[in-house]
Amino acid sequence: MHCGHSTGRSGRDGHQPAGDVQAAGQPRNYRVVKHQKPTQMTQVSVYLNFERETEAAFNFYRSIFGGEFDGGIMRFRDVPPSENMPPMPEEDLDLVLHVSLPILDGFALMGSDAPKSMGFRVTSGNNVYLNLMPATRTETRRIFTALSEGGVVEQQLQEMFWGDYYGSLRDRFGIQWMFNCASKE
């Protein structure tokens, strides 16, 4: 298995797609990229969205992997009221806002319910995010900006009520990314 950051290469052949640019001796549609210092990440995890089954799914995963939920289960009723957010229907208040289950040597499964009352339409394929937790806000902005180029920003980076600097996007290849930076710098 090839690990790009250890060799200074971005892909199997050390190149990455770049439209119709052609570097000498390289296949058409590829360009040579410069080595970049590896990103410092405090954690990378997979974020799963369910319409209303997050708690059942995570109890199932916990029965397999063991362990406890990191910080318990946060519910939608725990969200402080905001003038920018309409009130939630009573039947959605006990749904899962956030849950994290550490598995396999520090890797975590994270998840939340995405109820229709909030405008979500969960379908297979749009319910998985790669969740990045960069060490600094500067690094968070750098990666967010780079991944959003040619993609769609779902939520701009901003301070959130849980204390993190958060944002989400879908990159130009359709991969969904979340960013949670706990650092204030």
Image: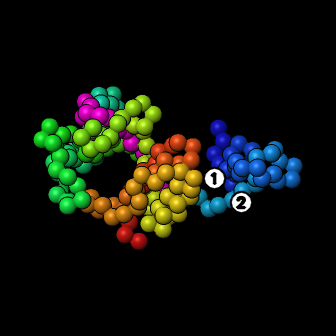
Crowd around label 1: few <14 · some 14–19 · many ≥20 (10 Å): some
Dot 1 corresponds to which residue?
5
> How far from the left and from the top, in percent, is residue 73?
22, 44
Left/right placement of residue 3 relative to residue 80 reads right
Q: Amino acid at mark 1?
A: His
Dot 2 corresponds to which residue?
34
Q: Earlier in the sequence, mark 1 or mark 2?
A: 1
Examine the rendered structure and indicate whether residue 124 appears above or below residue 167: above
In the image, what residue occupies the spot 71% across and 60% down?
34
In the image, what residue occupies the spot 39% across and 42% down?
47
Q: Quadrant of the N terminus?
A: top right
Badge 2 marks a residue whose secondary structure is loop
In the image, what residue occupies the spot 65% across and 52% down?
6
Residue 99 seen in render: no
Assess whether residue 50 is covered by the magenta stretch.
Answer: yes
Examine the rendered structure and indicate whether residue 183 appears above or below residue 53: below
Q: Amino acid at mark 2?
A: Lys
> How far from the left and from the top, in percent, is residue 174?
52, 42
For this orientation, the residue located farthest to the bottom is 185
Contact between marks 1 and 2 (CB within 8 A): the answer is: no
Examine the rendered structure and indicate whether residue 45 appears above or below residue 41: above
Left/right placement of residue 12 relative to residue 37 reads right
For this orientation, the residue located farthest to the left is 90
Q: Nearer the viewer, residue 43 or 91?
A: 91
| The image quarter in which residue 100 lies | top left
Magenta highlight: main SS: strand
